[in-house]
Structures are given as C-alpha cells and as structure tokens.
C-alpha cells in the first residue's frame, strides 16, 4: 500500500470584492449584524460573463499542477466537489477536463455533491485510489459560484450574506516518505436533516420527502402548490429556487460534530489535540471555528481563519484556507495539519495530514 500526499496546492478567488455595506444596498442588513454573527467582512463575487465554477476551479488547478511539478496531461483522475455547478448536469469534472485542455487523455472525472464537506470527501476518495496504486496524480478541486444563486433581497438575507465565490485545488500523489502525507480520513452523514440546509428546487421530488417528513407546511410547500413540476415561475416567485437554512439548528449540529470527527481521526492516528500544529476548519462561521478552537485548546495562530475576507465558499473553503496557510508559511513541513468540515446533508468529515 502507498501513502498519499498533497504534492501541490493552489487557489483562486474572483477580483470583485463585495463588502457588507454593499450588501445593505440590496437588503435590510448591516455590517454590524454580519460581523457580529459570522465574522465576515467581505466576500468575492465572480464575474457573470467571464467566470464559472469550472473556470475558477481550472485557475486553482493550474497553480496546484504547477506546484506539484507535473503537467496537466499527467493528471490521471479528476474529482470535482461543488454545489453550484455550471450545469444541473453534467458535473464540473468533465468541464474542467475540457477547460484544462486534457480531453485527449480521457481520464475519469468524478463529481462530488457533499456541499461543505465535499473537499473532505474528495480527499478521502483520492486517498483510497492512491493507496491502492490505481492513480498517481489525482486533481481534486473544490469550487463554488454561489453569487449566481443567492436571493440578494431581504427575504434571503439569513443565507445570502454568508456565501462567497472561489476555488481551491490540490494534486494528490503517492509518497514513499515514512510517516508523511494523509494519515487518516473520517466521513459521516445523517440524512435525517437533509432539508435543514438545502436547495430543494429544481428537483424531481414533487413534494414527496416534504410530505413524508411532514414539513411541507413549514416551508410553504404542498403538492397542490407545486404539483409534479420540475421548475416553475411560482417556485421562483416564492423564493423556492434559492437555498434555505435553519441557521441555529445547523450551528448547533456543527459545534457538536466538528470536535467529534476531529477526535475520531486523532484516536485512529493515536494522537491528541495537543499534537495538532494547524487546524483548517471549513469556513462556515467564525464563531463555529472559535468554538472548536476552544474545545481543542488551540492558540489563535494554530487555526486558519479567512472567512473574514471570503465568506463561506462551501466546497472551496478548506482548500482555499489550506492554500493560503501553506503560502504564508503557517503550515510547514512536518506539521500535523487537521482538516474538518460540516454542512448540508448533513455530511461531515476530517483528515489528518503530516505535511
Ligand atoms: O456552511 C454550511 C454550514 N452552515 C453553517 O454552519 C451556518 C450556521 N448558522 C449560522 O451561522 C447562524 O445561524 C447565522 C449566521 C446563519 C444566523 O445567525 P443567528 O444568530 O442564528 O440568527 P437568526 O437566524 O436566529 O436571526 C436572528 C435575527 C432574526 O430577527 P428576529 O426574528 O430576531 O427579529 C433575523 O430575521 O436576525 C435577523 N436576521 C438578520 N438581520 C440582519 C437574519 N439574517 C439577517 C441579516 N441581517 N443578514
């Protein structure tokens, strides 16, 4: 069995900065409310006519490929994690293959729909493929173009002030270096809470799950209202083509599951929180990261937080934060790096990497 390592990492964020004050031009919100509850000061929004989730992913991928010292042609498998794909289908995996100009190789491309924990799921999948010797240069991307799908009115303010656009990418390779690379990954989910943070339409559910769970009234849904249509003007008018989130419930689950899944990974690797050099949590809310930091008794300089600049970039948040931490020297060779994420599904996961 081989061990896998991150051989190259890169990130890309769009140029346009959108401050909290700018958001208050579209909706009833304030810089004070957003900073106090989330820590976010600004986020980036991609350019609608020039950028997509795929192009941002490709930009991050090019950096990761260069840093790994390989060419795009040497990538032998692609994994793309996003909830905001360019198309409903096909996924961004094949689109990024085309964008990178490597269609001739006809390598496999896999799309991951695990939202905030998508990158963690991707790392774990890549790790298994590399351990067994199946692939040698896996390109894993987490990217999001949230700004195209947010309700930027007061109706959607609880969700839309949190999210931003961006992309991060890594190249995973086998390593012979004893004790280095990915030590363990842990993945979990609980579908009981699928609708607590979700974009339900367009979809093929026809109200089925909502009725079964008895929640159609809460969300203002009913079969009579939407029938069996995939998408309608009424859904748009009612704001049901935008994500919905029960923020407080998600918050409570997150602060429980983050420490749990980190401790689980540490136990497998026979390590303790005191062994962690750097924690890179999914950038969901600065208050969540601070809570985990306290539980694990980590110093400020051991926790990577960039949500202030980018907001929550979902599948892109962990690779962007890790890429910045590597670039700034916060993550150094030999460090024990812990990655963790929690989000919609609910799905969550962790990874321990000896850098
Ligand atoms: O990455 C995926 C995982 N996601 C998360 O981890 C998110 C977890 N949840 C959260 O981060 C927090 O729940 C939020 C930041 C989303 C919301 O904070 P909260 O403290 O839970 O606020 P709330 O939703 O309970 O709303 C409190 C008040 C409400 O007003 P009333 O009913 O008290 O009068 C909201 O209408 O704040 C109001 N509100 C806002 N006010 C100004 C909600 N959104 C906004 C807003 N600006 N953007």
Image: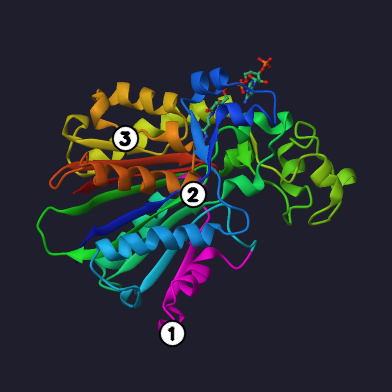
The front one of 29 and 131 is 29
Q: Residues within 10 Å of mark 2 (few under 14, many from 20)?
A: some
Asked which quadrant contains residue 87, the reply is bottom right
Q: Which residue is mark 2?
A: 14
Q: Quadrant of the image for the N terminus?
A: bottom left
Q: Which residue is mark 3?
A: 304
Numbered disc in front, either 1 or 2: 2
C-alpha span from label 1 to label 2: 29 Å
User: In the image, is residue 272 part of the stretch drawn in magenta?
Assistant: no
Q: Give me the residue at 76% from left, 31% from top.
A: 218
In the image, is residue 92 above or below residue 97?
above
Q: Mark 2 or mark 3, which has the lower sequence index?
A: 2
Tell me residue 24's x, y (percent): 65, 26
Q: Disc 1 on helix, strand or loop?
A: helix
In the image, is residue 31 above or below residue 49?
above
Numbered disc in front, either 2 or 3: 2
C-alpha span from label 3 to label 1: 38 Å
Give the residues in magenta: 89-116
Whether residue 246 can be seen here = no
Most distant residue in the left direction: 178
């Amino acid at each position: 069995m081989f061990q896998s390592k991150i051989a190259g990492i890169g990130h890309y964020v769009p140029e346009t900065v959108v401050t909290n004050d700018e958001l208050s031009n579209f909706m009833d919100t304030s810089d004070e409310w957003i900073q106090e509850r989330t820590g976010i000061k600004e986020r980036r929004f991609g350019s609608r006519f020039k950028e997509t989730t795929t192009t941002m992913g490709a930009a991050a991928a090019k950096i990761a490929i260069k840093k790994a010292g390989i060419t795009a042609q040497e990538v032998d498998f692609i994994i793309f994690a996003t909830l905001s794909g360019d198309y409903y289908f096909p996924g961004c995996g094949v689109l990024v293959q085309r964008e990178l100009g490597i269609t001739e190789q006809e390598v496999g491309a896999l799309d991951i729909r695990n939202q905030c924990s998508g990158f963690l799921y991707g790392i774990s999948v890549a790790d298994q493929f590399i351990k067994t010797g199946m692939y040698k240069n896996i390109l894993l991307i987490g990217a999001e173009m949230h700004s195209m799908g947010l309700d930027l009115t007061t109706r959607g303010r609880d969700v839309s002030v949190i999210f931003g656009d961006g992309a991060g990418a890594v190249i995973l390779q086998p390593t012979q270096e004893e004790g280095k690379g990915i030590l363990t990954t842990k993945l979990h989910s609980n579908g009981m809470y699928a609708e607590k943070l979700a974009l339900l339409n367009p979809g093929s559910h026809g109200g089925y799950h909502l009725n079964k769970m008895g929640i159609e009234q809460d969300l203002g849904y009913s079969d009579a209202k939407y029938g069996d249509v995939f998408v309608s003007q009424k859904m748009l008018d009612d704001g049901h083509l935008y994500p919905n989130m029960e923020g407080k419930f998600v918050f409570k689950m997150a602060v429980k599951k983050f420490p749990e899944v980190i401790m689980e990974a540490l136990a497998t690797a026979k390590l303790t929180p005191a062994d962690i050099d750097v924690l890179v949590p999914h950038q969901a809310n600065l208050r969540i990261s601070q809570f985990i930091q306290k539980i694990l008794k980590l110093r400020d300089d051991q926790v990577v937080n960039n949500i202030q600049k980018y907001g929550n970039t979902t599948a892109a948040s962990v690779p962007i934060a890790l890429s910045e931490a590597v670039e700034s020297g916060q993550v150094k060779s030999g460090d024990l790096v812990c990655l963790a994420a929690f989000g919609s599904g609910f799905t969550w996961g962790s990874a321990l990497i000896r850098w």
